[in-house]
Structure formats: structure tokens, C-alpha cells
Image (cartoon, grey):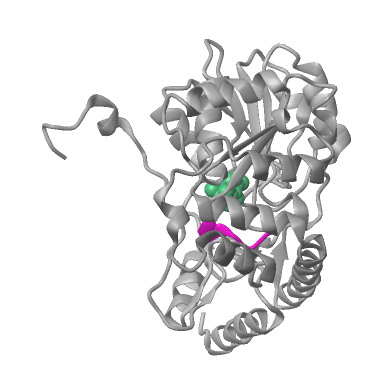
Amino acid sequence: MSRYWSDIVHRLTPYVPGEQPALAHPVKLNTNENPYPPSPRVLDAIRRELGDTADALRRYPDPSARKLRETVAAYHGIRADQVFAGNGSDEVLALTFQALLKHDKPLLFPDITYSFYPTYAKLFEVDYRTVPLDDRFAINVDDYAVPNGGILFPNPNAPTGRPLPLAEIERLVASHPDAVTVIDEAYVDFGAESAIGLIDRYPNLLVVQTVSKSRSLAGMRVGFAFGDAALIDALNRVKNSFNSYPLDRLAQAAATAAYEDDAWFRECCAKVIASRERLAAELTALGFEVVPSAANLLFARHERYDAATLASQLREKEIFVRHFNAPRIDQYLRISVGTDAECDVLLDALRGIFSTYVG
Ligand SMILES: *Cc1c(COP(=O)(O)O)cnc(C)c1O
């Protein structure tokens, strides 16, 4: 604390990201990174952008990331003016809070969801209410039928991985025409249905995606919003009042190349999905209750073992999973889906912990 701090700094509750351990070979199942490398075309594109002398880096990047947006728009069968590109979807969400979600009526999001949402709400002084998930951690769209200045949740939800059918999302968006509904699709490529196909029909729908998870580019920081051109315009107005160049040249080249290699993307997603199903079955056999997941993560609790203790015992073995000390979910672990080999290391460690437990 310092007398130099502005008022708002005193009131913030900063988001705490998962640990990035300084170890040579951690089994890192705590931040939902992809266990597979990005397409080889990404490396080629970065090399091409740099050339022999990195001369391109003298110049500012394209402030509007036009080529990237055109590539991604063509990929999804929409127009480039329906695409916004930002420095990771976290930044896209931050701009969305300011541009579209700050109104007199409160923003609604689930009680159990991505913990960055309340952080942004405090930073941008957006009034919000949380709407409880049901006891199976499902979103019931009828619970959102209260006056609101916007609705926001991930599909699949975080940190549970539980998906909501597209028909339910359409029902929600159709029944709230006076405010923007934002669907955060950070994990959609691992088995849920995207709402991008609805943006032409619903001018109040914004869909947010990222290359961090399904395209293995968390280190590049690229995210998108898809929606009616007027919504994208609002994001651009805020962006251009804050940072004209959120995406550097290498990030634009890398993300463009990632979208140009659809076969690689599909193969990585299929491998992660297969490993998820296998890991879910093995965890269930070990006595875990696993929430049905359409993401690259599993949310699970054990009938007998305390989650925080398990997380710290795994950590001693250099296996990292995420534990949230929060109401309703403090007995759960969020486990990112790694390679089958990484999942096996985790399962062996759990078997070891359970076999030595004297309780
Ligand atoms: C990972 C994640 C993000 C952030 O992704 P970046 O593009 O890496 O900033 C946003 N929303 C949810 C729900 C996430 O899990």
C-alpha cells in the first residue's frame, strides 16, 4: 500500500493466474495450455516475418490486424468487419466490459465461472450480480430472466468444462434483445457448439475466442470477438482510446498461420478430446466424481480426499493442477488435459498418494 495509489487500486482484487513453475520438466496441468505444439506453419510464418535481419520490427504492426481478421473471417464464413482482434481474449473481454457491458442495470454472470469477470467488473466499475449454477453446475438460461445490462459466461463454462447446448444460448440471446450477451468460447473447439453462426441474426450477441487453448498459442496473446459490426465498432473505439497496436507483428503472423492449417488444429483437438475421455474414465475408477466436460480440462472431486491437500501433494511431485479456494468448489480440482503420458504420470501419482494414505 502507498499514499500514491489511486482510489481504485485500493479496491481491486487482481486475478491470480495459475503458477508457471521454474522447473525443467513440470507436469503442468494447471493453466489449460495445449500439450501439443502449434502448427509448423506458425514457426515458418514467424521466421518469414523476421527475415534475416528482423528489419520488419522497426515498423509498427498493422493496428487493425487486417490480414489476420480477414483470414479468421473467411475461416468462419463471416465478414472482417464482424471480427475484432486483441491481445489475448482477456484483453478482448476487458475492452468488452468498457465498451458494451457497463450500464445502469447490472451485468449478470454465473456464481461459478471464469474468475477474471469479477476482477474486470471492479476495475471498470461495472455493477454485477451472480446467478447460481444448479447443483450439477449447469447454467439454466431461465435464471437470467431478470433486468440486466448484459449477460456473460463461457461456453463450455470455466472452471467446470460443462457445455450449454446452442439452442439454449439462442433462446437466451433472443429473449434479451435490449442488452448484449457475451459468450466466451475459450474452450469451444474441444467439443461444444459455437454461437458464431448466430451473429448475423442477433445484433446483441458477441462471441469471444482465443488461440491460447485449441491452437497452442497461449504465449502469443491473440484473442477475438465476433459480432455485429456495430459491436465490433464499439470495441475498436475503446481499443483506439487505449492502445492502437495491441497485436505485435509476430503475433499477427503466427495466428494467421495457425488458422491456415486446419488439419493440424483438428488433429490436436481430437487428440486432446480422446485423452480427456480416457482421463475422465481413469479418474472415475479412482473414486473421483468428474463433471461432464467439453473443454480441455476436467473438474473433479474425490469422495474421500481433500482437494487442497491433494493439490499440494501433487505439487511436491512437480505435478501442477489448479485448486480454487472458493465457495461451492473448494473440494474440486481443475485438471488440464495433457498428453496421455502426462495424464498417466498424474494417475500414477494419485494411486501412490491414495495407497499411502492413513485416514
Ligand atoms: C483461458 C481463458 C481466457 C483467456 O484466454 P487468453 O486468450 O489467453 O487471454 C478467457 N476466458 C476463459 C474462460 C478462459 O479459460
Q: Is residue 332 placed above or below 151 in the rendered structure?
A: below
Q: Quadrant of residue 333?
A: bottom right
Report x, y in % for residue 308: 47, 65
Q: Looking at the image, which residue sits at the far right?
A: 167
Say if the magenta span includes residue 50.
no
Q: Looking at the image, which residue sits at the far left?
A: 3
Q: Quadrant of residue 153?
A: top right
Report x, y in % for residue 99: 54, 21
Seen in the image, is 201 located left or right of residue 53?
A: right
Q: Is residue 227 placed above or below 46 in the rendered structure?
A: above
Nearest the viewer among 196 and 144 is 196
Q: Is residue 31 placed above or below 159 in the rendered structure?
A: below
- Pick the quarter of the image with the N terminus: top left
> Residue, x 52% and y 27% (percent of image)?
97
> Residue, x 54% and y 46% (percent of image)?
88
Nearest the viewer among 55 and 146 is 55
Residue 319 in view, yes or no: yes
Residue 292 in view, yes or no: no
Report x, y in % for residue 160: 66, 52
> Residue, x 73% and y 44% (percent of image)?
72
| Residues shaded magenta | 215-220
